[in-house]
Amino acid sequence: MAKQTPSQASHDPSFSTLEDSGWSEVPVVTELSDWEFATNYRDAMRPVLLRDGSAAWRACQRWSPQYFEEIAGSLTVPVKTLNRTDIKVSSWRLADYARFVMEQPPGGNGVSSDARAAPYCHDIPLLGLMETLPGDCQPFPANFLEPSYRSHWWRYSQFFMGPAGTVTPLHFDTLLSHNLFFQICGAKQFTILPPSQAGRCGRRGWRWFDVDPEQPDPVRFPQYEQATPVVVTVNAGDILYMPPGTLHHVRSLSTSISFNIDFHTDRSVLRALAHANNGMPTEVAYYNAITALAVIAKMPESVTFPLYCPYLSYVS
């Protein structure tokens, strides 16, 4: 890739329209009411880490690779191998993948994003496929979500399981949606940046970036030296919230199990739809339009979810 000049980055209109509140840190709190979350973070477009927010869940005591080996039955899932420029997808029996994870070394090896391109159970709608799992996630903070997601929140979740060292390269979430992330087992390290700094990170396609925040290349990406990444360790039982468009690079520090929910409010889905002619893939614009029917037009979930459901596989 050619060296990116400052003028190229600063005049790229696709970067200037990614708005944020100018945050530069991730507050860590131990208590967070529904009102405080909505007012101070979600609607203010600021990230927050709720320490031990889900630590009382049965999932945090029960979920492990061994547990999923025991309960998976014959379920088959897509598994990814990711690096900075390529994603390969293969099909695994979940029980076999859980055994694979148990056989891996307990700690990571190095910091390069390409150091350990291990198969990774990544972005799988598992909680919607295994009906016993949502019951392990109680009391669930459903009121953190927009109302149309609350009754069947698990349908909108994406599941992650992998060994230490697995990495998701720098990206933002496809729909430009809010991201509520739950760490269940092990720990992950997030390196996050606000959307306004996307022009410093070597954007590739719609949502991926070529900068490796752990080992940035100052020759290829000189503007990244002006970026202000924030590194956050998310431990088992923690809940991390990231606003729409947040760039994040994620490393598993140990064997890890987690899930997240991408959700929209009326404000965020309208902002996302404004990008329909700004490089957003047609499929992504379609799923945002379906979400707008649920969030803004208040169409019933029985109508909108069957139309939205393929998005969960589209991400996978």
Image (cartoon, grey):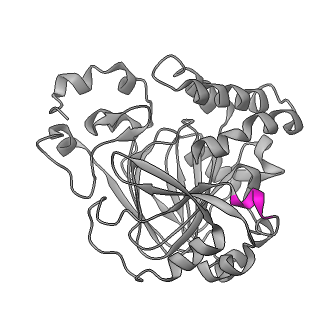
Residue 174: give x, y in percent of width and height. 53, 38
Image quadrant assignment for residue 238: bottom right
- Seen from the viewer's position, the closer of residues 300 and 31 is 300
User: Is 239 placed left or right of 166 in the picture?
Assistant: right
Residue 75: give x, y in percent of width and height. 72, 65
Number of marks in the rendered image: 0
Q: Residue at x 55, y 53 (%)?
A: 241
User: Is 270 placed left or right of 57 in the picture?
Assistant: left
In the image, which residues are magenta? 126-130
Image quadrant assignment for residue 92: bottom right
Q: Main secondary structure of the magenta part?
A: helix
Q: Is residue 26 above or below residue 4?
A: below
Q: Magenta span has 129?
A: yes
Q: Is residue 77 above or below residue 257?
A: above
Q: Residue at x 72, y 72 (%)?
A: 72
- Seen from the viewer's position, the closer of residues 75 and 134 is 75
User: Is 315 placed left or right of 133 in the picture?
Assistant: left
- Seen from the viewer's position, the closer of residues 272 and 243 is 272
Residue 42: give x, y in percent of width and height. 59, 44
User: Is 134 placed left or right of 164 in the picture?
Assistant: right
Is residue 96 visible in the rendered image? The answer is yes
Q: Residue at x 54, y 40 (%)?
A: 44
Is residue 267 visible in the rendered image? The answer is no
Residue 227: give x, y in percent of width and height. 25, 44
